[in-house]
Image (tube, rainbow, N blue to C red):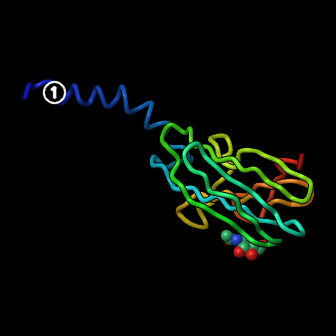
Amino acid sequence: MSHFFLPLLILAYILFCTPLCAQVSHHESNSIVEPVVVHIISRVPGSLRFHCKSKDDDLGSHTSSNGQEFKWKFIPNIFRSTLFFCHFYWNSKQQIFDVYNKDIDPDCDNSKVSFDFQCYWEARPDGFYLSNDNQTWKKRNNWA
Ligand SMILES: *[C@@H]1O[C@H](CO)[C@@H](O)[C@H](O)[C@H]1NC(C)=O
């Protein structure tokens, strides 16, 4: 093996990994991609129906009654292009929006609860609220 193979390897690592690995640290301090758990919680009277998908996964159609929770777990890709969107239906109202993407990710965090990142969504009669701890909620979307 030539004597400059190792320095070349280190140089290649610096050139190619540094920008990529910086992207990987999508959750503040850690340099690994942590699993994300998205929770969809119904807080509407009657039944909430929703259908969530990513580019690759179709989670199917689900119906929840008031207080019920549906959740799924995934590992975002290192390019940060992972995206899940849901179509919600309640009575005659509906709405469709991203429940997880790289811009929502920073609002999904709770190192206190578990290793996983948590995104909590509540569907309420007046719209959709996001929380990172299942306690403090911020309104993000209205019903259409
Ligand atoms: C979220 O909080 C509600 C009570 O406010 C509780 O019933 C539910 O189990 C919690 N969900 C999780 C995943 O912690």
Q: Is mark 1 within 8 Å of ligand 1?
A: no
Residue visible at 62% across and 56% down in the picture: 59
Q: Number of marks in the image? A: 1
Residue at left offset 82%, top offset 59%: 123
Quick one: 112 or 61, which is closer to the camera?
A: 61
Residue 144 to residue 112: above or below: above
- Ligand 1, by image quadrant, is bottom right
Q: Nearer the viewer, residue 83 or 135?
A: 83
Q: Which residue is rendered at x = 67% and y = 40% of the image?
A: 103
| The image quarter in which residue 8 lies | top left
Residue 45 place in picture, x, y as percent: 90, 69
Assign the N terminus to one quadrant of the image.
top left
Circle 1 residues within 10 Å: few <14, some 14–19, many ≥20: few
SS at badge 1:
helix
> Is residue 95 toward the left or the right of residue 35 in the image?
right
Q: Position of residue 6 (x, y in %)?
A: 18, 30
Q: Would residue 106 be seen by someone viewing this image from the given angle? A: no
Report whether 10 appears left or right of 65: left
> Of the residues shown, which amino acid type is indicated by label 1?
Phe
Question: For this rendering, which residue is in front, 5 or 100?
Answer: 100
Quarter-of-image position of residue 16 = top left
Q: Quadrant of the C terminus?
A: top right
Where is residue 133 shown, x and y percent of the image? 70, 63
Task: Tell me if residue 46 comes above or below residue 87 in the rendering.
Answer: below
Give the residue at mark 1: 5
Residue 54: tell me if it is visible.
yes
Residue located at (8% from left, 25% from top) = 2
Residue 127: x %, y % from top left? 87, 54
- Left or right, 24 with respect to 50, comes to left
Q: Nearer the viewer, residue 103 or 41?
A: 41
Kindly give the residue lying farthest to the left in the view shown: 1
